[in-house]
Image: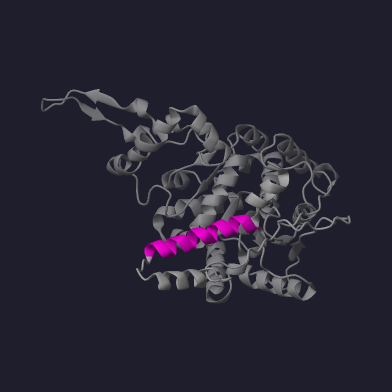
């Protein structure tokens, strides 16, 4: 079969044609009539352009211009070195960041908060993950005493759980990878840890043996342990960030179960000793349960603003904020990074709610606004000089940055790669 035939059979127009035919067939099968004249009339109506499907619309993803390697950027040498090592480890970073990613890095370490307003597929996630990595690197090098303390160094705030779950997978591939973790955690007594804290995180309330048996044991016995019997499956899930970055066998602690004679006679009784189980292991990079996070807050915490509001109200999560507060007050150089993804969604009444939530968080941590570094990202904040002024005003109001503050926001926009050539478009799609 020739290449032209392959393109015509598997192109956009052919695919849309097959989808339209399938939809028309479904309609005719589900809404059966006996009158042949009506059937023919309906078929003619369904075959009219736009009756069941519109003409296909194809949108390409723009290509962004590459910047200089990390060692040529205006960055602290230790930060540039760690980013280059992670790029060499092939865990999601590249030897040359995009121009806008490089600008975000330089402006962040020059002291600015960031607004990354670039298009879809432009690497906005890396635009805030790289500053987080750099700040963790600086703390381990300059403040090893505080690096050993529990507490949230970076809070990633999303508008919905679906985005949290997607982001968790990407962070697992970076911070959860053993090689990458060794690079990022150099100089620390323990690995840099992360965890998600949402309504889906097991489980709410205080831990008890009864609830561990009801909520954790089935999760492991029915899901994780059977999958662990097939290493190739675990390897595949790990590659796409869908497997926890922790020693699940040691964490579940099934070895602590034992059979003892039943004092009432009959079959032996199984004692599960939950008090010795579900304990974070020394090499774990990810925290899986809410209790783990409450006992020792991870360095990177991923949640949504609704859950954060509950956390600020409930006594059971008080330790998370107390540990972060103690870490912040341990050294004046320590700063919390607060990432607001999809920032364009925080407008109107919802935006006012999030703005007040941020102020409550700062009050709980007992730190001024200048001790928190904000990184806002969005693909829908507009472009142009007038838009940048409006974006800056929006960010200041949302995060509570005073007009007289010396910090300010740096608005980072994408730089598209310039393409040259005189190639003619094909009549085939």
x, y (%) of residue 429? 70, 56
Q: How is the image coloured?
A: one colour
Compared with residue 59, is residue 71 higher up or lower down, i.e. above or below? above
Examine the rendering and report whether any part of residue 301 can be seen.
no
Compared with residue 207, is residue 282 higher up or lower down, i.e. above or below? above
Q: Which residue is the extreme one toward the front?
A: 36
Determine if the magenta segment contains residue 26. yes
Magenta segment: 13-30
Identify the residue shown where x is 63% and y is 70%. 400
Q: Quadrant of residue 346?
A: bottom right
Please give left or right for residue 93 compared with residue 256 in the image.
right
Determine if the magenta segment contains residue 57. no
Looking at the picture, tell me which residue is in the foreground, 9 or 398. Answer: 9
Examine the rendering and report whether any part of residue 99 can be seen.
yes
Instruction: Name the chief secondary structure element in magenta.
Output: helix
x, y (%) of residue 375? 66, 59
Identify the residue shown where x is 59% and y is 59%. 16
Looking at the picture, tell me which residue is in the foreground, 207 or 268. Answer: 268
Please give left or right for residue 309 compared with residue 13 in the image.
left
x, y (%) of residue 201? 43, 49
* Quadrant into which the N terminus falls: top right
x, y (%) of residue 283? 54, 32
Numbered disc total:
0
Looking at the picture, tell me which residue is in the foreground, 167 or 72. Answer: 167
Compared with residue 22, is residue 227 higher up or lower down, i.e. above or below? above
């Amino acid at each position: 079969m020739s290449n032209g035939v392959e393109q015509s059979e598997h192109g956009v127009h052919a695919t849309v044609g097959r989808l339209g035919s399938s939809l028309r067939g479904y309609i005719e099968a589900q809404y059966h009539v006996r009158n042949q004249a009506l059937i023919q009339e309906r078929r003619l109506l369904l075959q009219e352009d736009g009756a069941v499907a519109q003409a296909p619309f194809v949108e390409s993803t723009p290509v962004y211009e590459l910047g200089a390697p990390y060692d040529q950027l205006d960055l602290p040498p230790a930060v540039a070195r760690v980013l280059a090592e992670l790029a060499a480890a092939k865990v999601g970073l590249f030897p040359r960041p995009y121009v806008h990613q490089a600008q975000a890095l330089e402006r962040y370490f020059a002291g600015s908060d960031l607004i990354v307003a670039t298009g879809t597929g432009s690497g906005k996630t890396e635009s805030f993950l790289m500053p987080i990595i750099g700040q963790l690197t600086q703390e381990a090098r300059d403040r090893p005493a505080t690096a050993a303390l529990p507490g949230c160094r970076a809070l990633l705030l999303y508008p919905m759980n679906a985005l949290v779950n997607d982001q968790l997978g990407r962070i697992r591939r970076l911070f959860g990878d053993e090689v990458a973790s060794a690079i990022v955690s150099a100089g620390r007594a323990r690995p840099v840890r992360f965890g998600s804290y949402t309504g889906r995180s097991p489980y709410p309330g205080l831990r008890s043996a009864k609830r561990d048996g009801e909520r954790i044991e089935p999760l492991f016995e029915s899901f994780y342990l059977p999958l662990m019997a097939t290493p190739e499956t675990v390897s595949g899930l790990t590659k796409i960030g869908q497997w926890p970055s922790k020693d699940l066998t040691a964490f579940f602690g099934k070895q602590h179960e034992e059979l003892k004679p039943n004092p009432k006679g009959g079959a032996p009784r199984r004692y599960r000793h939950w008090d010795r189980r579900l304990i974070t292991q020394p090499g774990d990079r990810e925290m899986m349960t809410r209790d783990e996070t409450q006992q020792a807050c991870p360095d990177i915490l991923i949640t949504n603003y609704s859950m954060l509001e509950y956390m600020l109200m409930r006594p059971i999560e008080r330790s998370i904020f107390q540990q972060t507060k103690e870490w912040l007050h341990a050294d004046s150089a320590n700063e919390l990074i607060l990432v607001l993804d999809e920032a364009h969604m925080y407008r109107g009444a919802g935006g006012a709610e999030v703005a007040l939530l941020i102020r409550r968080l700062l009050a709980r941590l007992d730190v001024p606004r200048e001790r928190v570094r904000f990184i806002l990202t969005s693909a829908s904040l507009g472009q142009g000089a007038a838009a940048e002024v409006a974006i800056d005003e929006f960010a200041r109001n949302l995060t509570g940055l005073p007009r007289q503050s010396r910090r300010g926001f740096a608005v980072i926009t994408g730089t598209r790669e310039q393409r040259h050539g005189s190639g003619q478009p094909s009549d085939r799609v």
